[in-house]
Image (cartoon, helix red, strand yellow):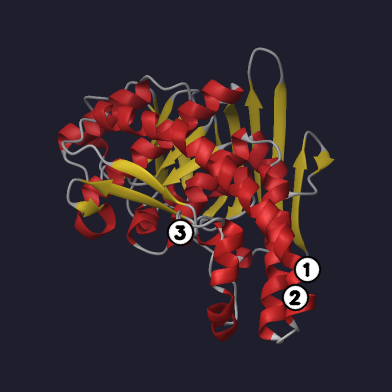
Amino acid sequence: MSFDLIRVGCFRNLLQTEVVPQPGINIFFGKNASGKSSFLEALYVLGRGKSFRENHPLNLISHGMRSFNVYGRKIDDQRRVQIGVEYSRGGFKAHLDGAPVLRLSQLAEQTPIQIIAPNTLEIVEKGSMGRRSLIDWGVFHVEHEFGKISSRYRRVLSQRNADIRNNVTSRASSIWIPELVSLGNQIDTARCRYTDLLKIRFQQYSKLLGMEQIPSLELFKGWSSKHSLEESLKLSAEQDKKRGFVSVGPHRADLLFKDEQGLLKKWGSRGQIKMSLIALSLAQVDLLFELRQKRSVLLLDDLPSELDEESLANVYAVLCNSKHQVFITTVDKSRFSKLHRGGWFHVEHGAIAEVCV
């Protein structure tokens, strides 16, 4: 399903705007700070219930206003779905076809959404949490019980960490170990199964995008492959007491991007890292469609940055052949003038208008 209507109200500098996008590629152009990224951010909030660049939702509300709202209508040959989110000082509210949304996972299930933005390049360059979330996005969408298992694991891990910090006796604290092992192994099995399928498609898309050096993906499970999770927890127990937390397990997993020189975060250029993330996103939405027949929404903020003309043309060509709805922002529309024949939207002072180019 793709959006055929999007309304945004009082979201950053977008006071009231309505967009009727095309099911394929839609390009939004305008000067810096005109509202292009804010529109993508509003779409992301509609799909995930949170921002990709702001931790405090109140900061998303337009200056002087009391709340923001985002509405989207999705449609295909069989049915229509309406989604709405609103945030004020009273809290966050969401509705799906008029019924209240009780869990953010309901929004995520309805609209699989991927974002490539300038700040997302840091996912490869910095800590493991962001890279781990890339894998978990895909596993969540293809493994029905993964969300519940992960939530339960985080609760048990929190209890175990609290016991470590409070110096609870080993006998009382050890009651959490069997459940940590069981849940942790289930998470690892699901991630490994998904990553094995993803690796092939990732390299296929890397080739389609014309990357000179084809990177590879490697999943580090969060503990040494020489030992089981149970053995690793026992071996790290003394050090964990000194650290004050459990240092091994699936919560320490990492997704490693590598090329012939080693880790991409050390040796890769910004352009290579961006192309790798685009290849990964395409591989993930392709795999999701193959396994669950679910179409995704791709958000590409300032796509041309870091990319030369050949790379940009390759990315656009691959996107044209995808089954998913795409929203692209750019400052310089001329970089797409010979490529794009789809929807064009001009963004200026928080207003969005469809135009003919």
- Left or right? Give the position of 117 relative to 230: left
Of 118 and 273, nearer the camera is: 273
**Dot 3 corresponds to which residue?**
224
Task: Name the amino acid type tagged 1.
Answer: Ile
Please tell me which residue is depicted at 55% across the width and 47% down the height of the picture: 136
**Dot 2 corresponds to which residue?**
173
Can residue 8 be spotted in the picture? no
Please tell me which residue is depicted at 72% across the width and 42% down the height of the picture: 106
- Characterize the local packing of mark 3: few (<14), some (14-19) or many (20 or more) Cα atoms within 10 angstroms: few
**Dot 1 corresponds to which residue?**
175
Of 329 and 31, nearer the camera is: 329
Please tell me which residue is depicted at 63% across the width and 17% down the height of the picture: 76
Could you tell me if the residues under marks 1 and 2 are in contact, i.e. CB atoms within 8 Å?
yes
Is 292 drawn above or below residue 350 in the view shown? above
| First reached walking from the N terminus: tag 3 or tag 1 | 1
Task: Name the amino acid type tagged 3.
Answer: Ser
Q: Secondary structure at mark 1?
A: helix
Task: Name the amino acid type tagged 2.
Answer: Ser
Q: Position of residue 258 (x, y in %)?
A: 28, 48
Q: Position of residue 352 (x, y in %)?
A: 47, 41
Is 130 drawn above or below residue 164 in the view shown? above
Please tell me which residue is depicted at 49% across the width and 56% down the height of the picture: 253
- Characterize the local packing of mark 2: few (<14), some (14-19) or many (20 or more) Cα atoms within 10 angstroms: some
